[in-house]
Image (cartoon, rainbow, N blue to C red):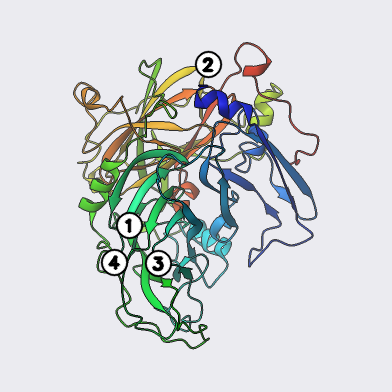
Amino acid sequence: MKSLSQQCRMMLLVIFISILLAGFVPFSFASPVIRRFQHGVKQLRTGWADGPAYITQCPIRSGESYTYKFSVIDQRGTLWWHAHYSWQRASVHGAFIIYPRMPYPFSTFPIEAGIPLIFGEWWNGDVEEVENEMLKSGGGPNNSDAYTINGLPGPLYPCSSRDTFISTVERGKTYLLRVINGALNDELFFAIANHTLTVVEIDAAYTKPFNTTAIMIAPGQTTTLLLNTDQIQIPDHSSGILFPMAITPYVTSSFPFNNSTSIGFLRYKSRKMNKLKRKTKFPSNQIPENLPDMKDTAFATAFSNKLRSLNSPLYPCNVPKTVHKRVFVTISLNLQNCPSRKSCKGLNGKRFFASMNNQSFIRPDSSILESHYRKIATNSYSTDFPEKPITVFDYTGVNPLTKNMNTEFGTKLLAVPYGTNLEIVFQGTNFLSVENHPIHVHGHNFFVVGRGFGNFNAGRDPAKYNLVDPPERNTVAVPRGGWAAIRIKADNPGVWFIHCHLEEHTSWGLAMGLIVRNGAGDSKSLLPPPDDLPLC
């Protein structure tokens, strides 16, 4: 029998995606440019189609078009796409589902249907104005006005009961829920009343199945669930049997947040089911009892600790056992002095920024990937990102009011040879607030070999790494006041963005870049850029 890797390479899929901006940008965006990103697609040798603005390409301008051409190799499952310029992904996003050629390894029952569930945030105003005001004032952003399930806020918000997501199912069937957290600034809990969920996949990588009453999902992450419609109940509603589903934020920060809850419904078909009316009154007991409390760190931790790669003969867990390079990265929220004679809205009249190893990332005004490929001498970026903090301190115990919280600004990247087995430890800090940070790595999947609270101990913690079946991801939620260790096989040449998937933090500079140099031969080298690559 051929290995799964051999089978996947035999079914190379080429996808063409074209975006034409005919003088406008969808929704309420005022910006004349847009950038699209296939979140989680590895883009093997095709970094030109990956695309955060000014990292792998210049933005697509109004009236212009760009066709994304890339191959999907060795991947299957639930991913998504979204804009990657400013905060446009608030409403420019969607599911990107790769169907497998082989049967699913996790279900002995036929799957009736797949149900995409995309969670988001909604602002009544222009999200670019929200970001611009945040950067101009130096303070935090305005909170969103609602959370949404498939674009709909649900009946708990003013005047929105008719804008409620309802999924109609049949009793006695098995459904595949493809859950995507597209929210800008919040990790979320999700649950369905009276139903147990079975986790079978995360970030398009199969897991050892396990049952749970709810999930925690960070921005950028996907989770695929089996849902058995096994409830037996007499219809209590003219529109059928309704079971509330809900999302609410997982709160790990002392910063202001949207503390609301969005509701949708799972509707069992019944013989007497009527068509839903515009003024339908939904059940009063709408929030599922199994939805975790907003500050339930114990549940979030226990859920994350249950995640394991499937690690079967057909789907092996290829975690690097040896390491060629180790990098230690602190994740910090910072304060910077305001311009002279001005007062900002951050703490103590200062400005909020964010950093990795005290480097606040500044995007250049040209494409880093293009400069790297063409070997253009430029001052727009450098490859001297520090591989460890300049100063060692008590990262999670520091008293922020007594420490220097300034940061340096620049466009520093880490460069490694092709094939490097790279270990990165992301360490949270308590400069301003301890909180979870969902860190996303472009161009590669990685294995989360360790997580913990407090400060990482290089002499003690690696002995507890899981090198047998660690979860495979593209976005890791670094725990509140803790650390996460990941291992990457750097075998995809190009320039890859590494950033926090909380948009406010990325806007403040919580990002870095990874350059994977070409290997030996064309098959291990970056392909040439397409002819229609946008210009800056």
Q: Which residue in the structure is indicated by mark 2?
A: 417
Q: Which residue in the structure is indicated by mark 3?
A: 171
Q: Nearer the viewer, mark 2 or mark 1?
A: 2
Q: Which residue in the structure is indicated by mark 4?
A: 194
Residue 212 in view of the camera = yes
Q: How far apart in space, not on screen, are marks 2 and 3 (Cα)?
A: 54 Å
The location of residue 275, given as percent across then percent down, is 52, 83
The location of residue 131, given as percent across then percent down, is 52, 59
Q: Amino acid at mark 2?
A: Pro
Q: How far apart in space, not on screen, are marks 2 and 1 (Cα)?
A: 44 Å
Q: How far apart in space, not on screen, are marks 2 and 4 (Cα)?
A: 51 Å
Residue 367 in view of the camera = no
Q: How far apart in space, not on screen, are marks 1 and 4 (Cα)?
A: 47 Å
Q: How far apart in space, not on screen, are marks 1 and 3 (Cα)?
A: 57 Å
169 or 25, nearer to the observer? 169
Circle nearer the N terminus (4, 3): 3
Q: Quadrant of residue 240?
A: bottom left
Circle nearer the N terminus (2, 4): 4
Side (left or right) of 360 relative to 376:
left
Identify which residue is drawn at 34% across, 57% down: 347
Q: Amino acid at mark 4?
A: Asn
Q: Amino acid at mark 3?
A: Arg
Label number found at residue 450: none
Q: Secondary structure at mark 1?
A: helix
